[in-house]
Structures are given as structure tokens and as C-alpha cells.
Amino acid sequence: MIDTMTQERLSGLSRFYHDALLQDCVPFWFPRSVDAEHGGFFSALDRDGTLLDTDKSVWVQGRMSWMLLTLYNTVEKRPEWLAWAESGLRFMEQHCFDTDGRMFFHVTAEGRPIRKRRYAFSESFAAIAYAAHARATGNERSAARARELFEFFTRWNFTPGLMPPKFTDVRPMTGMGPRMITIVTAQELRENLGDSAELRGWIDRCIEEIRRLFIKPDLKCVMENVAPDGSIIDHFDGRTLNPGHAIEGAWFILHEGKYRNDASLIELGCQMLDWMWARGWDNEFGGLFYFRDVYDKPVQDYWHDMKFWWPHDETIIATLLAWTLTKDPKYAQWHQMVHDWSFKHFADPEHGEWYGYLHRDGRISVPLKGNLWKSFFHHPRALWYCWKLLAENRG
Amino acid sequence: MIDTMTQERLSGLSRFYHDALLQDCVPFWFPRSVDAEHGGFFSALDRDGTLLDTDKSVWVQGRMSWMLLTLYNTVEKRPEWLAWAESGLRFMEQHCFDTDGRMFFHVTAEGRPIRKRRYAFSESFAAIAYAAHARATGNERSAARARELFEFFTRWNFTPGLMPPKFTDVRPMTGMGPRMITIVTAQELRENLGDSAELRGWIDRCIEEIRRLFIKPDLKCVMENVAPDGSIIDHFDGRTLNPGHAIEGAWFILHEGKYRNDASLIELGCQMLDWMWARGWDNEFGGLFYFRDVYDKPVQDYWHDMKFWWPHDETIIATLLAWTLTKDPKYAQWHQMVHDWSFKHFADPEHGEWYGYLHRDGRISVPLKGNLWKSFFHHPRALWYCWKLLAENRG
């Protein structure tokens, strides 16, 4: 176990993330995920890249377009990256909006709707894709579309009574998810369209609500769902913690603390990371549990102890960012633990990219590399973010 | 491995199931699952019987009432069994019906609705509970209620356009579930209220539809979901097989073949069992996989290789029933394999009853004994059915 990051390790990691992004991850997904016939992206790829299902995820159209445009904006102006992203944007525009202005969740290859969900995360991922497109091309319509979709997303999530309840209205519950996603979406719009009082206001509001409703110092944890007044709903779903999600939220707040140079935000993000690392890290087999019960009771979701790819990608970012902001050696240690465990168990040296779903002990559950949820997003974002962060820190 | 059932093994198994039912399973659930305050049954019990969640499942109210009444009708007239079942029926009547006549799925301890689903299985479980109550007490109103609920259930499932589609109507899909449950519900009404042309007609229709739409001799399998014309929907959900469910359906058809002394039904049930045993049995670790892909592609559900309690209970019944009807020694072998694996891995010698959710290799995932789905139903039904079947066969 290392105590601190040496310059040598920093420089090795920076190269490692750079190469993993551009020589492993990007070539796995492209060009094979681009639908040359109908536009947009397939994501249900088997271990070797074979297409398993032609259906398309609306989340994926926005997320993959955003990731490609971010590489275009910050790495290299490769024309194919822009062209593929524009194919994703066109597919969304033509096929992914319902007549009420809301987006679908799951459509056929041709763009016929299979499923629409009550929540509006599709809209937030479309918003960041349009914002990155506006920066890449100067297209004013894309900038306007990004702002409209952000406005739609925040209105849908924060206007009481607008989003239908999950089931009945007998036991209302509110989630950390919409707050986290509002923060990162506003950060992306700021990055690509410029700062505004409105974006800053949304970030402030969501951080305040996370502090007030979801952070529980007495229990040393971050709740995933609470009653509207922040109290714990003592039933299976109310007690369920999602450590990877809370750690993802932690780094959005650390990122904000860094941007604003605000020590209180850095303290908050580190606190969230510390508590949820303690809750989520599996001391027996390594890796992060998917769900835990706040009182250590049995979780209803029987696959609770599986190791999913994305919490590991998010924790790689969070620990590295916490270390760069605090230089606390425990974060360098945690970063090495999660980095080493993840690349040992998720990586596929034969066909590239990461598996998505491992059993608790690291054995592969399903060998596929993508589906409606897993695509070219969490993993390349982590590689890109960590590479750029280390490049800054090597100064 | 045994080749045939000896009289000695038959008699030992009969005692084993009798004792497991009355000395292990019943005392685990009762009286602790009965809600003395509001009536009805809790089911979210931890390993040692501690209550984990006070919410109530509407399926569970009907299923536990039915199981208690079946024991009352066929084992012993214990007044507490009748009283507890009547508490479940009263709770359903008072709290589990919506204003449109349909039932909820999940309610609070007091009976306030948390969730209603688009499908109507709650109604089928209520129907069998009322039918068993009519037999136990001669209550004509319960008999009428059972018939009404059966009529409601079949109308909801078999009137085109009545049940809303799962998502959009772009890719219609029809399931084996409603056919299977119609068969077993009609069998229960026949058992407790007497035979009728209507019940026989529903059983005939559902068996014919299973044969025509779900049975695939070229692929040697029973599909779980197909397009309305029986064709395979070549997407993740259309390709997913549920071996335990198909084997449960197989024994409903074997039961019918036995009742009617119809060799073609016995042949059909055995065929379904043979194919789905081949698809579902885990030759490496033992036990039955939860899901498989019809073309052996990766399944979308990442917990696909877990071992759930209920497919094992259903396969214990199916293999024993197939053996009693055919005396084919392979069924005696399979019965011993699934019986031995199940009682070795699911049973909890310390606190009684079965765990519900194991990892592929038989390790426990969550130690709880009940939740909204697992209750006093699949396991006691298997113990009761097998005990009674062996008692007949020792004859």
C-alpha cells in the first residue's frame, strides 16, 4: 500500500488513463456502435463487440453524444467524433421525444418507442450533449436546446406534483438522484455555455437539499431516498443505501468545491466519500457493494452484493479528486485499492473495455460490455476525468 | 444416485415432507406472521423470524390464507388455522380492493395502498383462498366471491386491450404466466367448489395456447414470453427463459393429466419438464438457474444465475409427480438431485424454514425468510403436495 502519490506514480497513472481511454475504450465502441442505417448508437454489445440487441437507449444517445463531443472539445478535433455525435443528436431529435415534449427511455433501432419512464433523466443527458455540441460547433440552436432541456428537467423534478409518484401517494419519498444530476448537468452547461446566476442557483439549491435531507451525521451515511422532510422511511426501500451513487454525488460536490475554491464544499464531499467508502467497500473480497441497509439489515434486492462497473469508475474519480484537493494519504490509498481491484476484475485484456456485472468475489456474471444502461459513458468519463486531473496536478 | 424409488425411500420421503411441513415450516410462520392489531399477515421476516418490514403483500394475504385453509381441509381441522385464514380474508376484503374492483399489490400494515400493478395475480390468489374457505366452512358467499374473482382474473387477462401493455404497444408480447395461473386457479376452484364446464374450458384453452404459442420443439424449450402469434421476439426480454416457471407450469399440466387420466397431457408435461431441466439445471454447482437465454446469449438480468427457493420447490413437485405418473427412473434421479441440493442449501437448521436467495454456488445472498414475494406458500405447498402424493403412492 502506498502512503502518498509519488511524481512517478502520478505520471504513470496519467499515461495509463490516457491509453486506456484512447487505445482500449474508444476503439471498442467505435465505429461498431454507430447505426449507419438509422443513426444513433447501439449499446447492447457482447464481450467481443457482437451486437446482442438492436434496441436503443435514449439515455445512451445523449450520454455517448456528450462523451464524444467532450473528447472533441478537450482532446482532439477528430471529425469522426463530431460526425458520430451529430448522428446521435439527430436520432434523438427525430425519434426520442414524445408529443408532450418529454423523452422516451427505450426505442427500437428505427426509433419507435418501447418505453417512457416517469422520471426525466433522458432529458438531462440530452441537455449535456447539446451543450457540448454548442461548444464544439458554435451552434446557437444547440445552446438554446441545452438550456430548454435543463429547464424542463429541473421543472419536472422540482415542481411539487408534476412528476407522478412511483406508486401511490401514501408514502411520499424523495431521492438524491435528481439533486446529483441537476448539479452535474448545471456544471456541464456552465463548462460549455458559460456561467450564469441560474445555474449557480440550481447547484446551491441542490447542495443545500443534499445537506439538509440526505446527510445523516448521527448514522454516518448519505441516504439514497428519504421522506420529503428528510426523515428515514423505515421500510426496505427507504433503508437501502447506494454507496456508489453517493460517492458519485460526492465528487460532483468536490468538483464544485474545486471550481469555487470553497473549503466547506470540499469538506462536505470528503465527508460523503468517507462515510460511503466505509459503508460500501467490501473488506473481504474488495470492490464496492451495490446496496447496503442503513441499519445493516438484509436488503430486499437479492443481488445487493454484486460489483457493478460504474460505482468503481465513480470511486476512482472521487478518491483521486479528494486526494488532489486534500493530499490526505488515505485517499491515495483508497484510489489505489479501487483502481487495482477494478482493472484486475472488470478489464477484459482479450477484447477490451470493461465487463459490467461481477459477482461479489469478482467472478463475471454476464460477459456483455453494454446494454440499455452500460455504454460509452461512466468508464470513458472516469478515464478522461482522471487523465485530465493528473495532467493538471503534474503541472 | 438411485435408479428407482424403493418402498423404503418412498416411505422415508413421505415422513420427511410431513415433518418438514408441520414441525419446521408451519411453526416458523405462525403465529408470528399474523398481525393481531390490523389482521392479515406480515411476511418480511428475518432469518430468526424478526419482523423486517411491516408492509403487506396482497399476493401473500391470498396465498397464506389459501395454504392455511388447504391444511385445514386436508390435514387437520385446527381452529387457529381457520381463524388466521379468516383474518387474512377480512384484511383483503377491507383494504386490498381499489374502487375499480381491482386489487392492490402492496399495502401498509394498516391497509393503505402503496402499489397496484397492471396485472391481476392478486385476484387469482384471492380466488383460491375464497374457494378453500367455502370448502372449509360451507360459506356460500366465499364460493361466490371465488367465482367472481376467477371471472375477473380471466376477463382481465384474456380480453384483448383490457390490461394495459407493459410499456407502449409497439412490440406486443404475451406471457405464459397468465395461462399457467389460470390452469392452477381453475384446478383449485374445481377441487373445492366442484367441477364445471366453464372451469374445464379455461383449462383446455390455456393448455392449447401453451402448446401452440410457447412450446418450441425445434429449440427444445418452453418460452416465457412470445409475440401474440407465438414467434420469438429476438431481444433480451423475448429471449429470456425462466426454467423454474416453465417447470411449475409442467406440473400443473401433469396434475391435469393425472386428474383426467389423459396420456397426452402427461406426455406434454414431461416434455416441458425434460426440456427445461436440461436448460435450467446447473451441472457445475447444482440447483436451478433463474434465467437462461434461449440462444445461450448473455441474459440482461445480471442476477440470472442465482438460485431462488421457489423454482426448487416447484421442481421437487414436478419431478416427483412425473415419476409417480411414468415410473421413469430419470425422474426419481432428478427428484433426488433437486431435493438433496435444496435441503442442503436452502434449509436453515438453526431457525427453521428456507432461505430464499442463494448465489450460484449455494452461498446465502440475503438471509431473510420472507418479503413481498416469499411467504408461506411455495415451500409449504411443495411439502404438502409431495407428502400427499407419496401417501397415495404408498397406497
Image (cartoon, coloured by chain):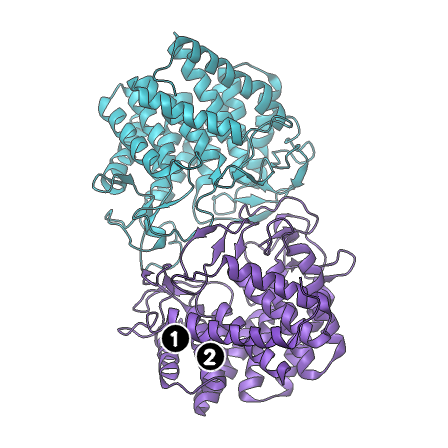
Chain colours: A cyan, B purple
Q: Is residue B71 left or right of residue A229?
A: right
The residue depicted at 71 percent of the width and 65 percent of the height is B330
1 and 2 marks in contact (CB < 8 Å):
yes
Looking at the image, is mark 1 or mark 2 earlier in the sequence? 1
Which residue appears at 49% of the width and 39% of the height?
Answer: A361
In the depicted view, which residue is nearer to us: A139 or A119?
Answer: A119
A81, above or below B327, in the image: above
Residue closest to the eye, A110 or A330: A330
Q: Amino acid at mark 1?
A: Met
- Outermost residue, right direction? B218
The numbered mark 2 sits on a residue in which chain?
Answer: B
Q: Is residue B322 left or right of residue B30?
A: right
Please tell me whether mark 1 sits on a helix, a strand or a loop.
helix
Which image quarter: residue A353? top right
Residue sitting at x 42%, y 87% = B77
Label 2 secondary element: helix
Task: Give the residue displayed 24% in from the left and 26% down from the top.
Answer: A267
User: Residue A276's spot in the image, x, y percent?
Assistant: 33, 36
- Three-letter amino acid code of the residue under disc 2: Ala
Crowdedness near tag 2: few (<14), some (14–19) or many (≥20) residues, C-alpha within 10 Å: many
Q: Which residue is mark 1?
A: B92
For residue B214, above or below residue A111: below
Residue B395 position, x and y percent, is 63, 85
Asked whether, in this view, residue A13 is left or right of residue B37, the answer is right
The answer to which image quadrant residue A259 occupies is top left
- Chain label for disc 1: B
Residue lying furthest front: B8
Q: Would you say residue B101 is visible in this rendering?
A: no
Q: Which mark is residue A161?
A: none
